[in-house]
Amino acid sequence: MASTSIHNGQGSDEFRPQSNVPPATRDHGHIEPGEIAVGVVIGRASEYFDFFVYALASVLVFPAIFFPFEQRLEGTLYAFTIFAFAFLARPIGTAIFMAIQRAYGREVKLTLALFLLGFSTAGIALLPTFDHIGMWSIALLSLLRVGQGIALGGAWDGLPSLLAMNAPQNKRGWYAALGQLGAPLGFVIAASLFAYMLANLTTEDFLDWGWRFPFYVAFAINVVALFARLRLVSTPEYAKLLDERELEPAGIIELTTTQGRNILIGALAALASYALFHLVTVFPLSWIKLYSLRETAGFLVVQIIGGVIMALGIVISGAIADRFGRRTTLGSMALLIAILSAFVPTLMNGGESGQNAFILIGFGLLGLSYGQAAGAVTANFQSRYRYTGAALTQDVAWLVGAGFAPLVALGLSAHFGMAYVSFYLLSGAVGSLAALSLNRALESREE
């Protein structure tokens, strides 16, 4: 049976070196972990930029141009429903593209996935609005959003797992954190573009053509990221290292039947991070847009500052994890997120100062927690399941923790009050603490 442990020693909560791995495998002196980290950041930053461009447009644009027949609240809820389609499609994309990799290789898989992502993103930029083609615009938006989700599932290149396995024993938390920097980087760039557009265009121009520009930028970044990532994964040195670490796709059915417990524990261990993710990015922006007189561009600036704080928190999380262990770090951050959940109504209903405090504190905790979330999705699997297991666990974590978060949070707060958002965030923190406790119990039982 596969081990289900997320160990608590300094750096020991990642993959341990295989005793039967030949020295040549362990000594790739010319391939430094820093090189792999650069590849991870490039790949994740491009994906997160796409992610946040669509997320921000779901608040600022799509309710007005695709659902003009509904009130603003209902239009935003419909937009958030389509936003969730990508998270439902990601596991399907993982399964499809793992089969493609087994048949045609890693380079073909990555190329097809990123071309699909670019096509879907560019397609959204070119979409006619509801006023032009009616319900067809909504159907096409939904189809392209599903395409984005399938592509994101297929874009898994194994580099985060490779980074975790090749980082120095006493710096694995640090290198895991570096791999997570793509999230705040993607958010800051996307939010900056939208803030600039909102501040410098009339509402009519923004809704007519201005909103499309970030999607064109996302397409261009995808092209650059494609070649950058292919340059890494297609070289003989990286291909050899990936092969020697057994980072090859496994069958989805076999994986889920033999490693289902690992997938569930890995997904839930970082649930607090994923639950908080959209509650400091997408949801507050929708709330401000609907129920506040605050200038949207100004609020985005506050969130951009929060993104910078998140990046600092991610870096700091590496030092904390290397000192105290990943399980302790994740558990401590889940507890702090649970405490923050109690103050959501007070802060969000506390005017600009309260809202700003929630955003900045939330982003700080998100960085400290999310910086080590990748460890929870890579440490539990036997070598033959590591590659596909890490991808599918990440898909499940996003689906359960974040996919429906904007929809649920906005719907609950609009109809029942902000206190229900507290319960939603608290449930994520409780899920993480329960998963970590279960993992500890299983570890003790199996020793």
Image: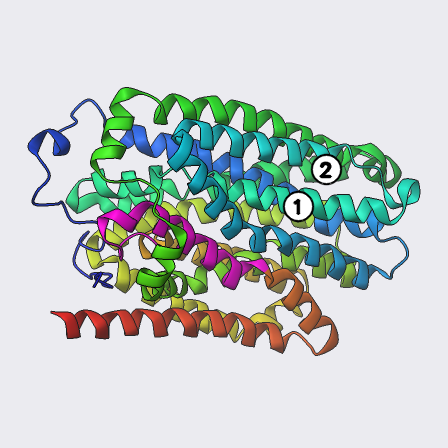
Left or right relative to 382: residue 18:
left
Quarter of image, res 246: top left
Left or right relative to 43: residue 283:
right
Name which residue type carries label 1.
Answer: Arg
**Label 2 residue SS:** helix
Q: Which mark is residue 417?
A: none
* Residue bearing mark 1: 145
Residue 148 belongs to magenta span: no
Name which residue type carries label 2.
Answer: Ile
Left or right relative to 409: residue 431:
left
* Residue bearing mark 2: 124
Residue 39 in the image, given as x and y percentages of width and height: 38, 30
Mark 2, Cα crowd under 10 Å, few <14 / some 14-19 / many 20+, is many
Please provide the residue range marked out in magenta.
377-403
Work out which residue is located at the far front of the displayed protein and give it: 103
Residue 185 in the image, given as x and y percentages of width and height: 50, 38
Residue 257 visible to an observer of this rendering: yes
**Residue that appears at 29% across and 74% down:** 438
Camera-side residue: 446 or 338? 446
CB contact under 8 Å: marks 1 and 2: yes
**Residue that appears at 66% across and 45% down:** 145
Report the coloring of the rendering.
rainbow
Does residue 75 sit above or below 163 in this rendering?
Answer: below
Residue 379 in the image, given as x and y percentages of width and height: 26, 54
Task: Give me the C-alpha separation between circle 1 and circle 2.
Answer: 8 Å
**Label 1 residue SS:** helix
In the picture, the quarter occupied by the N terminus is bottom left
**Residue that appears at 61% across and 64% down:** 354
**Residue that appears at 52% across and 23% down:** 224
